[in-house]
Image (cartoon, helix red, strand yellow):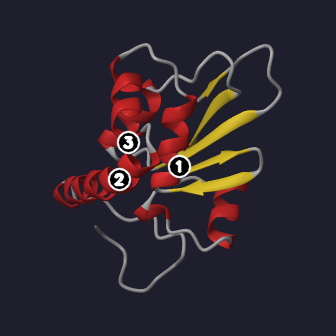
């Protein structure tokens, strides 16, 4: 899914686990500010150039979302902080994101809590891990 903007050639690529209901709800409802590049949502469970970059960088996508901006991969709390900074102020999810993750200190404190809740939910839902780093014994949450 891609949200297009006429005035921008660049994009912000948001890579997340589309099988996670929380991630799907948050990511599909996040809207960037009009001055920001277009937002491109990428399912981490599908092969893509950016997933290859993430794996080559040694980033475990099961342990954090990734935002690629201006060629730079941002991971976990840095990713969600950047996303909050780029989002507009309209809508529940944008306001929630800015409130919780708009400050880098808040993002570093709250991200592990959000991730733990996400991992528990995925375990209860019996979801498989993406395991992009192909680590043995890491098939399920």
Residue at image location 60% in from the left, 54% down from the top: 74
Circle 1 packing at 10 Å, graded few (<14), some (14-19), many (20+), is: many
- Which numbered disc flags the more N-terminal residue, 2 or 3? 3
Q: What residue is disc 3 on? A: 23
Does any portion of residue 48 appear in the rendered image?
no
**Quadrant of the rendered structure where residue 47 is?**
bottom right
- Secondary structure under the numbered disc 3 in the rendered image: helix
**Marks 2 and 3 close (CB-CB < 8 Å):** no
Q: What residue is disc 1 on? A: 79
Circle 3 packing at 10 Å, graded few (<14), some (14-19), many (20+), is: some
Relative vertical location of residue 35 with respect to residue 44 in this rendering, above or below: above
**Marks 3 and 1 close (CB-CB < 8 Å):** no
Find the distance from the CA under tag 3 to the CA under tag 1.
Answer: 13 Å
Residue at image location 64% in from the left, 41% down from the top: 13
Residue 105 locus on image (x, y percent): 40, 51
Does any portion of residue 84 appear in the rendered image?
yes
**Quadrant of the rendered structure where residue 93 is?**
top left
Residue 102 locus on image (x, y percent): 44, 37
- Secondary structure under the numbered disc 2 in the rendered image: helix
Find the distance from the CA under tag 2 to the CA under tag 3.
Answer: 13 Å
Q: Quadrant of the C terminus?
A: bottom left
In the rendered view, does 93 fall on the left or right side of 54?
A: left
Q: Nearer the viewer, mark 2 or mark 3?
A: 2
Q: Nearer the viewer, mark 3 or mark 1?
A: 1
- Secondary structure under the numbered disc 1 in the rendered image: helix
In the rendered view, does 127 fall on the left or right side of 75?
A: left
- Which numbered disc flags the more N-terminal residue, 3 or 1? 3
In-front residue for pair 118/137: 118
Relative vertical location of residue 13 with respect to residue 5 in this rendering, above or below: below
Q: What residue is disc 2 on? A: 111
Residue at image location 36% in from the left, 74% down from the top: 139
């Amino acid at each position: 899914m891609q949200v297009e903007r006429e005035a921008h050639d660049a994009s912000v690529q948001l890579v997340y686990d589309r099988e996670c209901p929380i991630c799907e709800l948050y990511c599909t409802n996040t809207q960037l500010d009009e001055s920001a590049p277009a937002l491109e949502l990428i399912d981490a469970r599908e092969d893509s150039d950016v997933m290859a970059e993430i794996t080559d960088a040694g980033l475990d996508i099961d342990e954090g979302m990734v935002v690629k901006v201006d060629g730079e991969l941002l991971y976990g709390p840095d990713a969600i902080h950047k996303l909050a900074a780029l989002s507009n102020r309209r809508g529940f999810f944008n306001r929630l994101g800015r409130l919780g993750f708009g400050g880098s200190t808040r993002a570093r404190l709250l991200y592990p809590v959000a991730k733990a809740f996400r991992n528990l939910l995925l375990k209860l839902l019996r979801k498989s891990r993406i395991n992009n780093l192909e680590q043995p014994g890491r098939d399920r949450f």
